[in-house]
Image (cartoon, rainbow, N blue to C red):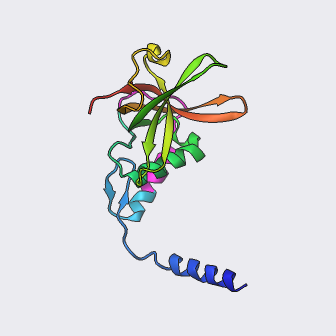
Amino acid sequence: MKRFILVLSCLFMVGCNSTNKVDEVNANGEKAGNKSSIVAESSTFNESESETLKDDGEIDFDLSIMGADMVYATIYQMMIDPHTYEGKRFKIRGNYYSSYSKDKNEYYHFCMIKDAAACCAQGLELLWEDGKMNLHEGCPEEDAMVTIEGVFETYEEGPNTYGRIANAKLVDE
């Protein structure tokens, strides 16, 4: 019982600290002036959800310029709520890897992005715009640092829903 009261009082103290200003970073890696602008951007983002892949070339989320913590949080959010990010254009930077599935006779391609401590990584699956690259022709070397642009989509495989960067292409930095 004492432990419960201690935890509860700690939560109350943390909750009361909302008057401090904190530098927030929006989806493009820019500092936002206050929390209300973050909320406004968030609600605009949810209202403009797209059911189809867009290809206007405008980047919605540039993870290549975000801090490592923000990148990790964004990718985590993409994995737990993938439908919110469907149709959004991403720019990501990380290490390229591929894997071959003998059962399906196909390659899977990934961009692995390390967290702030560089101990953990989260990967985003890639579906190349160039069909030859999906067959593993002309792909980057394994573990090469790459910058990729593409559109996030979800797909079903069996009972599971997965997310990936579709129409992926390598970009020069």
Residue at 38% across / 53% down in the picture?
26
From what the image shows, is residue 30 above or below residue 157?
Answer: below
The reply to whether the magenta stretch includes residue 3 is no
Q: Can you see residue 89? A: yes
The reply to whether the magenta stretch includes residue 53 is yes
Residue at 67% across / 82% down in the picture?
3
Provide residue 11's location: percent of width, then percent of height. 57, 77
Q: Quadrant of residue 103?
A: top right
Provide residue 43's location: percent of width, then percent of height. 49, 52
- Nearer to us in this view, 48 or 123: 123
Q: Quadrant of the N terminus?
A: bottom right
Q: Quadrant of the C terminus?
A: top left
Provide residue 27's location: percent of width, then percent of height. 40, 49
Q: Quadrant of residue 69?
A: bottom left
The magenta stretch is 40-57
User: Would residue 10 appear left or right of 168 to someone viewing this image?
Assistant: right
Residue at 37% across / 68% down in the picture?
22
Q: Can you see residue 44? A: no
Provide residue 67's location: percent of width, then percent of height. 36, 52
User: Would residue 166 appear left or right of 12 to someone viewing this image?
Assistant: left
